[in-house]
Amino acid sequence: MRARLAFLLAVVLSAEGCAASAPTPERQPQDGDARPSAGPVETGRGVLRVRDADPARSGKQFIGAELERDDGERWVLDYGREPLWQAFDGRRVEIDGRRYQPEGQALIATHFRVETLRVAGSRDGALLGFGPERQLEGSFLGHTVELGSKAEGMRVVEFVEASGARWMLERTPSTPPEGRAVAIRARRVEPNWSWAARMGGEYLWVLEVLEVR
């Protein structure tokens, strides 16, 4: 009797072990899924290209930014029409960032999330690079430039962080909501001071106003 009970117990435990080790069906990615964690930091060099839809062609087309690497490989940098890429379209650049695997519908290509960018060729252009994307809290404040300055009488809007740090604005996606507490998504940009006259200071490219309080 004891031998039979031991045999039955071994069968049950074996069945439970098999059930626990059975593979879970893989979930198929859906459009809009969050992107998974990225890999190690890498550097890429090449020419940045901004692609838009060709009205002469039918079907789905890639709209966004890509890097034509020096070795001929193409990296997808972004989908959509973010204007920041336009400032570097056709210019040779060096980028730092991480590869990632997109989910949902995407091109069959290397996808690369850019953290920093530096112009590596001709310095003809208003900007020479940008830094990592950041989320900042503060407010947009406008003022008139004081007398004695080259820009005297000009009305200027700055972004002032809650810490007191002040930023000149290279671009905002819409008219800033002045005098209200906001959260923004932005990148610091490096101006080309020899390209055109501008006021001194650190410059910010606002990608999105996330919240207005």
Image (cartoon, rainbow, N blue to C red):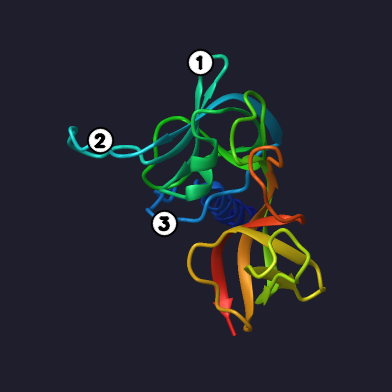
Q: Are marks 3 and 1 in contact (CB under 8 Å)?
A: no
Q: Nearer the viewer, residue 54 or 203?
A: 203
Q: Which comes before the other along the chain, label 3 or label 1? A: 3
The image position of residue 96, as x and y in percent, is 68, 35
Residue type at tag 1: Gly
| Residue 72 disc label | 1
Q: Is residue 199 left or right of residue 80?
A: right
- Mark 3 highlights which residue? 32
Q: Are marks 2 and 1 in contact (CB under 8 Å)?
A: no
| Residue 54 disc label | 2
Q: Residue furthest top?
A: 71
In 3D space, how far apart are the residues under numbered discs 3 and 1 (Cα atoms)? 30 Å
Q: Which comes before the other along the chain, label 2 or label 1? A: 2
Q: Is residue 181 left or right of residue 149?
A: left
Q: Residue at x 59, y 79 (%)?
A: 178
Label 1 neighbour load within 10 Å: few <14, some 14-19, many 20+: few
Q: Which comes before the other along the chain, label 2 or label 3? A: 3
Q: Nearer the viewer, mark 3 or mark 1?
A: 1
Q: Nearer the viewer, mark 2 or mark 3?
A: 2
Q: Nearer the viewer, residue 75 or 208?
A: 208
